[in-house]
Each structure stands twice: as C-alpha cells, then as structure tokens.
Image (cartoon, helix red, strand yellow):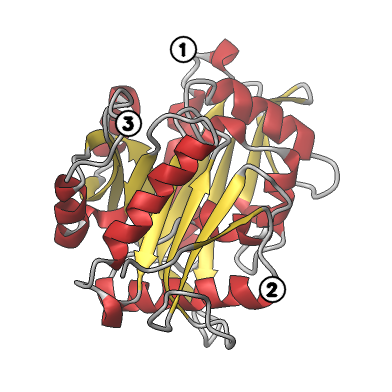
Amino acid sequence: MPPHVRTVRGPLDPTTAAAVRTLAHAAHEHDGVEALGEQTLLDLTADEDAHLHLLLGRDEGGGTADDGALVGYAALDLTGDPASAELVVAPSRRLAGLGRALLEEVHAAAARSGRAAPAVWAHGDLDAARALATAAGLTVHRELWRMGRDLRADEPEPEVPAGTTVRSFVPGRDEEAVVATNAAAFAWHPEQGRMTVADVRARAAEPWFDPADLLLLERDGALLGFLWLKVERTSDGRAADDGELYVLAVDPGTQGQGLGRYLAHLAPPRLAARGARRIVLYTEATNTAAVGLYRAMGLVTERSDVQYRRSPADDTMQP
C-alpha cells in the first residue's frame, strides 16, 4: 500500500514546523549537506498560500504521528516559474520508496494547482538524489555552485571607490532601499530577485544576523550596492569556520565602475576580522562574470546544488 502524504497549504503549526526542522537536521548530520535550504526553513511558518507542505508520518499508514515525528517532508513553492520543490526522507527510512512517493505527490500537487512540472532541488547532488531523479525521468535544469577558500590573517582591505562611503545597515530604516537594489541587481534570478522587506526582516530576526555584516555602499546618500555577510556561531559562541559572502548586489546603472569587484574584495578581510577561517559563497554556474571574479579571488568550486526537472510536456511520472 503506498504511503499517504498529508498536504498543508500555508503556515505549519509550531509543533509540525519543529518536527520538520528536526528531520532536516538529522538528514544534514547523516549526509553532510543540508537537505532543505534556508528559505524553505523560513517558509515553514510563513503566511503564504502558495507554499505547500507535504508531510509523511512515521506510522506504517503514512499519517502524521501524534508526537509530530516525521519520516518524510517536501516543500512546494508555487510563487516562482517554474515552481520549485525540496524533499527529505529520514535516513533510517530510506530505500523504501518514500522519496519516490513524495516526489510523485509533489508533481501531483503542482498539477492540481494548474502548474507545470516543478524544479526539484538536490543539495550536494548526492548519489541517492541523482538516482531518484533518474528513475523519475528528471534531468538537470539548473546548477548552483558553492565556492570557497581559506582565509588569511592578513587579508588586504580594498580601497573605497572615489566618491563613495560604506556604512552598516540600520534596521527599520534601510530595508526598502536594500530590497529595491537587490531587485534591480537580480531581476534575472528566479529566487534572489523576489526578496521582500519581510524576507529581510525575517533574516534580521535570525540568531546569526548582525547589522554590521550588511554593508551599504553609497554616493551622496544613494545606495549603489551592498555586501551582506553571514557569520554563524558555534554552541560555545565562536564564529563558525565558514563565513559566507551571503549576497552581493550592485545597481545595474553603476556597471563599469568596479563597485562589484570592490564589494567582493571587501568580504575576505571582514570575514577574517569576524573570526571565520574560510570564505564560502553560492553562485549560478552559468554566471560567468561572477564565477570569473571569484576564481580570480582564489575561490574554487567545492560542490554543486542541482535542480532537476522533467519535461513540462510530460504529464505523468516516468515508470
């Protein structure tokens, strides 16, 4: 008997959201790579009808257990084009067809919502995810690279471009300017370009956020671009080894002035000063300009996150 998948549209209750986070953490510990992205975890309790949560409980019938424990979860985000999805199965319950069941239900839920085949993320592009995608007739749709390198104690601070100043983000004042610049810089990007003021505030509420790590580059009070760094803390309060160049956005109207290069080179010394030992970032594999800049800074590709998708013309899952 195929397992039953329960679907919830909109925000999850706190208990169920906590169960999803626990499941995602267990998978991360087992696989060495996150199963669910940051935005998916933030969206667990977001009041958004376009977010669907597919829940597979631990009892043999597939329903959600009373204690909230889950063996499988999938997120379907209908806000983009194409819709996107992520899924995770408990390490102890794999190789039993649960991943395939969740994947089938993701496609069915998208179809019921009048949407074409969604793009499904596989973080780290692990062998098991690749095998599941192949069996389901999915092919690579998009590739996101994680790049990184070790930081040195003497990372040079770049010279501020003439006529510009750099300051830290001020919560409650700078959100709209950051969102507007981000939207212009990433108008081509299917996720980053949709960042809202609410998204900025949600991240500002996260334990890792520090306004001093969101640096605004201005000329005569106008925002030209920004560099957002992410430095998480270990349980004993130390900076995590990996410091992330989280977002780098430059107003397209300022292209050719070297502002993006300046902001990129500002990241290593700032991350080193915050106690990080490495710099990491994520970039589209097809963004040749960004990849070239980061390689010139000494960063190398460490892993790939891949989106798989089946042909939108194919209405059924492949056998």
What's the amino acid at mark 3?
Answer: Asp
Which residue bears the numbered disc 2?
A: 14
Residue at left offset 48%, top offset 21%? 188
Residue at left offset 38%, top offset 48%? 281
What's the amino acid at mark 1?
Answer: Gly
Q: In this view, does 125 lie to the left or right of 5?
A: left
Q: Residues within 10 Å of mark 1 (few under 14, many from 20)?
A: few
Q: In this view, does 158 lie to the left or right of 213?
A: left
Which residue bears the numbered disc 1?
A: 256
**From mark 1 to mark 3, how far is it between C-alphas?**
46 Å
Picture disc at residue 170: none
Residue at left offset 44%, top offset 38%? 264
The answer to which of 299 and 6 lies nearer the viewer is 6
The answer to which of 254 and 281 lies nearer the viewer is 281
**From mark 1 to mark 2, how far is it between C-alphas?**
47 Å
At mark 3, the secondary structure is loop
Where residue 116 appears, x then y in whole percent? 42, 29
Sooner in the amino-acid sequence: mark 2 or mark 3: 2
Picture disc at residue 315: 3
At mark 2, the secondary structure is helix
The answer to which of 272 and 7 lies nearer the viewer is 7
Where residue 164 appears, x then y in whole percent? 65, 26
What's the amino acid at mark 2?
Answer: Pro
Q: Residues within 10 Å of mark 2 (few under 14, many from 20)?
A: few
Where residue 83 appears, x then y in whole percent? 47, 36
